[in-house]
Amino acid sequence: MPEDPALTLLGRSESRLPASPDEARLETFPNRNPERDYWITLDCPEFTSLCPVTGQPDFAVLQIRYVPDQRCVETKSLKFYLASFRSRPSFNEEVVNRILTDLVAATDPRRMIVTGRFGSRGGISLSVEASHGPVG
């Protein structure tokens, strides 16, 4: 399989993480089965972001599920993109919705669901689910 010139991170030893999601680049590659509906599930059990009030880290288990159309997200670029939230102060709801917005812009999927299950603070756990396209 020939290398896709649009993939700039895959197979390279890049280690500098983007400073923010605005600086990050979500790379994609062609879906080899666009005629079929199928789910891709990406589990990110060690996601962190910054609380905009306390400046403390928020820990979450993040799950991204989508039915691709013409493009799929490349996972190394996704890893770098998600790591860029470590230094960006954002409320949990904003984080999940931003991830959905950016991934939809990059891949234009048929359906996508992003779920963040954030660690407990003050005895309350928070889960956020944002979706694109028909759900079900």
Image (tube, helix red, strand yellow):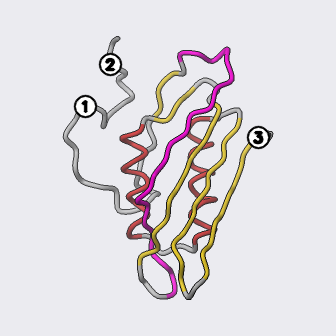
Query: Which of disc 2 and disc 3 is earlier in sequence?
Result: 2
| 100 vs 67: above or below | below
Q: Position of residue 65 (x, y in %)?
A: 60, 42
Q: Secondary structure at mark 2?
A: loop
Which stretch is magenta? 32-53
Q: Who's the residue at 53% across and 83% down the image? A: 121
| 115 vs 8: above or below | below
Q: CA distance from mark 2 to mark 1?
A: 10 Å
Query: Which of disc 3 and disc 1 is earlier in sequence?
Result: 1
Residue 11's disc number: 1
Q: Secondary structure at mark 3?
A: loop
Q: Toward which corner of the image does residue 88 lie, by quadrant? A: bottom left
Query: Which of disc 1 and disc 2 is earlier in sequence?
Result: 2
Which amino acid type is marked by label 3? Gly
CB atoms of marks 2 and 1 within 8 Å: yes
Q: Quadrant of the C terminus?
A: top right
Q: Toward which corner of the image does residue 117 lie, by quadrant? A: bottom right
Residue 3's disc number: 2
Q: CA distance from mark 3 to mark 2?
A: 31 Å
Q: Residues within 10 Å of mark 2 (few under 14, many from 20)?
A: few
Q: Position of residue 64 (x, y in %)?
A: 57, 46
CB atoms of marks 3 and 2 within 8 Å: no
